[in-house]
Amino acid sequence: MIKVLIVDDNKFITHAMRNILEEMDFNVVGVAHDGLQGIERFMEFWPDITLLDITMPNMDGLECLGKIMEMNSTARVVMLSAVQDKHTIRNCLASGAAGFLQKPIRKGNAEDLGRLSRALEHAAGKTV
């Protein structure tokens, strides 16, 4: 089972994503609410995939992504954000993100769940 870490400052988002991912048979190993916690949880759980928001307190997602990639250059991180700025998206991908998902991901929405599934499939390097 693929282990996933969710890093997002919005507790509603982390709760909803946990439910969605668990229904899709992913093992959500942890949740963090800012980039600093994200790094701590990453080192604690060494997830297969990290879902990472960009706009967060204490340490934003781009800085967190950089730190994760320094610790493990093969880490699979999928950015999950409402940010729509193409420069920011390109910067995330250039910094090592395996993918970028636009929020929201709505439970029961086939298109959203398909985007999520494809992004995680790509990040994991296998069919999920």
Image (tube, helix red, strand yellow):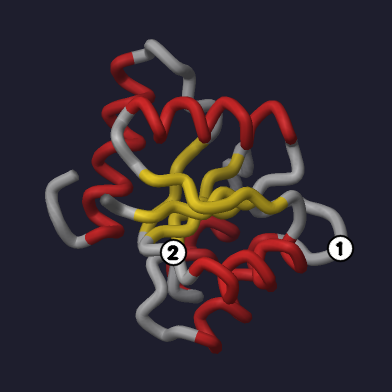
Q: Position of residue 111 (x, y in %)?
A: 31, 20
Q: Residue furthest left?
A: 127
Q: Residue furthest right?
A: 58
The residue closer to the viewer here, 55 or 113, is: 113
Q: Position of residue 112 (x, y in %)?
A: 38, 24
Q: Earlier in the sequence, mark 1 or mark 2?
A: 2
The residue closer to the viewer here, 109 or 17, is: 17
Q: Position of residue 15 (x, y in %)?
A: 62, 30
Give the SS element for disc 1: loop
Neighbor class of circle 2 (other Cα within 10 Å; few <14, some 14-19, many 20+) is: many
Q: Is residue 48 above or below residue 122?
A: below
Q: Residue at x 76, y 68 (%)?
A: 36
Q: Residue at x 74, y 36 (%)?
A: 10
| Disc sitting over residue 58 in the figure | 1
| Mark 1 residue type | Asn
- Proximity of marks 1 and 2: CB atoms separated by less than 8 Å: no
Q: To which residue does mark 2 refer?
A: 47
Give the SS element for disc 2: loop
